[in-house]
């Protein structure tokens, strides 16, 4: 552990797996007290809490279903009570789904927008007074899907684009009140969900060859940027969403991949009908 975030109080949503878990662990490694939110991945969040405590840190896990606003507000209350205030909010929680537009249901559309857009909006609303007291930072996690098109992602990409716009607008509103708002748009980052939908059959080296950097990102790559954006060193970065994708969207592809349906299905187990 180091102490670059010592004394900071941080809430990370969607911290039971993947990028959110990596962000929570990195803030804790830098000395912050961390509240880890999860919806379904309780075992991952609890394990992360144990890891942080064994290293001498302070952490707790909190469950909340982001499909409804009530639990979002309750999470804000419980996190502030545990942490004794708030310095950094990382809005990472989100769900994905790929589905052709003609097969997308109202229930699926509403769920993705509720979890990916409405929940972070009202979590910010519930916590803005605490962040104003501390001169805090909001880090919103979006996706490269907000920047480039991909087949069967009309709903998910719309939610990610909304977060980029929300980040920009909220930054302008809150900057005069001493709260800085920034965002991150991750590219390909291997997380548990990828292995689940592929049956564990992922050729990481083959994936890496499609990315200019030559490798696939890890949660730690996004976590390092999140910690930097929350630090005083990023004080002049306001309203921007930083793309962290190994150069993916810098490449201009010419091909016909967009004519082909996706071969895998995201959303199984948490989006009805996926």
Image (spheres, rainbow, N blue to C red):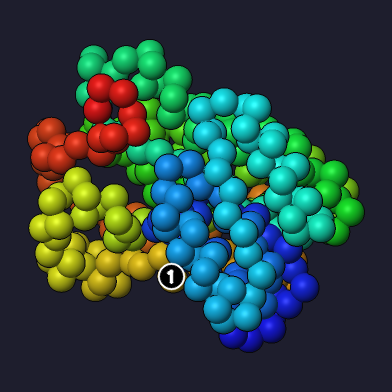
Residue in front for this viewpoint, 106 or 241: 106
Q: Is residue 130 visible?
A: yes
- Going 77% across and 73% down the picture, which residue do you hit? 7
**Image quadrant of residue 117?**
top right
Q: Is residue 157 above or below residue 245?
A: above
Q: Is residue 85 above or below residue 56?
A: above
In the picture, measured across the screen, residue 107 lies left or right of residue 33, that is left
Q: Is residue 241 visible?
A: no
Q: Which residue is mark 1?
A: 221
- Going 51% across and 47% down the picture, which residue do you hit? 38
Placement of the N terminus among the 4 image quadrants: bottom right
| Residue 204 horizontal/vertical position (percent) | 18, 67
**Image quadrant of residue 213?**
bottom left
Placement of the C terminus among the 4 image quadrants: top left
Work out which residue is located at the far bottom of the displayed protein and give it: 2
- Going 51% across and 28% down the picture, which residue do you hit? 67
| Residue 270 horizontal/vertical position (percent) | 34, 33
Q: Residues within 10 Å of mark 1 (few under 14, many from 20)?
A: some
Residue in front for this viewpoint, 177 or 120: 120
């Amino acid at each position: 552990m180091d102490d670059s975030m010592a004394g900071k109080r941080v809430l990370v949503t969607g911290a039971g797996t993947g990028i959110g878990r990596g962000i929570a662990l990195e803030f804790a490694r830098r000395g912050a007290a961390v509240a880890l939110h999860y919806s379904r991945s309780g075992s991952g969040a609890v394990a992360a809490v144990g890891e942080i405590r064994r290293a001498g840190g302070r952490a707790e896990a909190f469950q909340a279903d982001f499909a409804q606003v009530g639990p979002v507000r309750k999470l804000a209350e419980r996190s502030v009570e545990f942490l004794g205030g708030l310095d950094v909010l990382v809005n990472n929680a989100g769900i994905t789904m790929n589905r052709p537009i003609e097969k997308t249901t109202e229930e699926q559309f509403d769920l993705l927008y509720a979890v990916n857009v409405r929940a972070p909006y009202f979590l910010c609303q519930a916590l803005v007074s605490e962040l104003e007291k501390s001169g805090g930072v909001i880090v919103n996690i979006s996706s490269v899907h907000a920047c480039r098109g991909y087949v069967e992602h009309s709903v998910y990409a719309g939610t990610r684009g909304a977060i980029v716009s929300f980040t920009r607008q909220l930054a302008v509103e809150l900057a005069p009140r001493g709260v800085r708002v920034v965002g991150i748009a991750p590219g390909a980052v291997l997380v548990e969900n990828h292995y689940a939908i592929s049956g564990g059959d992922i050729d990481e080296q083959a994936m890496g060859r499609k990315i200019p950097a030559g490798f696939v990102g890890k949660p730690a790559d996004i976590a390092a940027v999140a910690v930097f954006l929350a630090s005083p060193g990023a004080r002049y970065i306001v309203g921007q969403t930083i793309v962290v994708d190994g150069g993916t969207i810098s490449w201009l592809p010419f091909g016909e991949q967009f004519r082909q349906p996706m071969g895998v299905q995201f959303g199984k187990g948490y989006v009805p009908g996926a």
